[in-house]
Amino acid sequence: MTFQKTKRMAAAAGVVLAAGALPILVAAPASATQSACSNYVASHGYRAGTKVKAACGHGAIDTGIGKAANPVCVTDLAQLGVKSDVSLPACKLA
């Protein structure tokens, strides 16, 4: 194999590697906000298990002025017994 061919193959591998890493970089902020939501619920004495994390997975709605709590998140948390004075701020963090 020539040096130029090896160099091109290495460059192509770097592009594939970078493309493969992109979804991980994009997914990180979503999981961080989901964690903020579930941590907020837990800090108010509720158990933040898989159902709370799933509810917090319904991200906040960007209104253009700020963030609003996603009604699906609020409803799911209410079904788990989380009071609205906790679920509304938590879902704004999602």
Image (cartoon, rainbow, N blue to C red):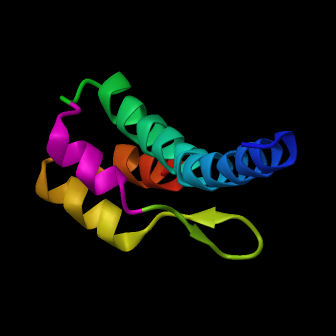
Horizontal side of residue 39 vs 22, given as left or right: left
Residue plotted at (36% across, 50% down): 87
Viewer can see residue 36: yes
Q: Nearer the viewer, residue 27 or 51?
A: 27
Give the answer, above or below, for where 4 lies relative to 61: above
Give the answer, above or below, for where 49 lies relative to 59: above
Horizontal and vertical percent for residue 8? 79, 51
Horizontal side of residue 72 vs 11, given as left or right: left
Horizontal side of residue 24 vs 14, given as left or right: left
Residue plotted at (33% across, 62% down): 73
Membership of 57 in magenta stretch:
yes
Give the answer, above or below, for where 58 lies relative to 47: below
- The residue most toward the bottom is 63
Quadrant of the drawing holding the N terminus: top right
Horizontal and vertical percent for residue 44? 33, 27
Where are the magenta residues, as a range?
48-58
Give the answer, above or below, for where 79 lies relative to 33: below
Residue plotted at (37% across, 72% down): 71
Horizontal and vertical percent for residue 20? 55, 51
Membership of 72 in magenta stretch:
no
Residue plotted at (78% across, 50% down): 5
Horizontal and vertical percent for residue 47? 18, 29
Per the picture, the main secondary structure of the magenta-coloured stretch is helix
